[in-house]
Amino acid sequence: QVQLVESGGGLVQSGGFLRLSCAVSGIMVSINAMGWYRQAPGAQRELVATITGGGSTNYADSVKGRFAISRDNAKNTLYLQMTNLKPEDTAVYYCNAPYGFQSYDWGQGTQVTVSS
C-alpha cells in the first residue's frame, strides 16, 4: 500500500520561501513519476510540478522559475522548493502521481499560506 505524507507548509510573507517534503512508502520515487498538486479554497486541484522516473521536470506556468521539484532516492522523499512566494500560492499542497499515471490515496496535504 502506497502512503504519502506531506509536510513543511506554514505561514510566510510574500517573497518568502518554503520547502515541502513528501515521504513516500510503498513505491520507489527513483523510478516512478511523481508530482506536486495544490488546491486553493473553492478551486480545483492543480498540478504544479512533475518529475519523471528519469528525472525530467515540468512546471505549471504559474510557478515556473520559482518552484523546483526534486527527490532524494535514499530517503524515498519528494521535495518542492518554493521561492518568491505570492499570496496566490496559498493552498493545500499534495504529492501524488501525475495525471495519466496510476493515482495513489491522497495524503492529508500541507497548508501553505502566503501573506501580502
Image (cartoon, rainbow, N blue to C red):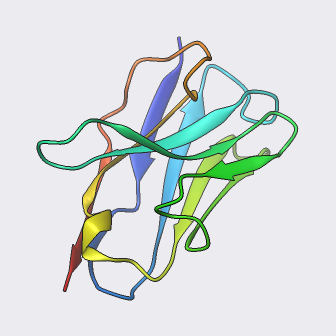
Point out the residue furthest to the front here. 61
Figure check: 51 above or below 84: above
Question: Residue 106's x, y, as percent?
Answer: 37, 25
Question: Residue 57's x, y, as percent?
Answer: 74, 49
Q: Total marks drawn?
A: 0
In the figure, residue 29 lies in which quadrant? Answer: top right
In the figure, residue 10 lies in which quadrant? Answer: bottom left
Q: Please indicate whether residue 95 sits to the left or right of residue 32 in the image.
A: left
Question: Residue 58's x, y, as percent?
Answer: 68, 49
Q: Quadrant of the C terminus?
A: bottom left
**Front residue of 76 and 97:** 97
Residue located at (55% from left, 73% from top):
66
Figure check: 51 above or below 96: below
Q: Please indicate whether residue 72 sits to the left or right of residue 99 in the image.
A: right
Question: Residue 39's x, y, as percent?
Answer: 28, 44
Figure check: 99 above or below 84: above
**Front residue of 65 and 82:** 65
**Front residue of 23 and 32:** 32
Residue located at (26% from left, 36% from top):
44
Point out the residue furthest to the right here. 54
Residue located at (57% from left, 39% from top):
35
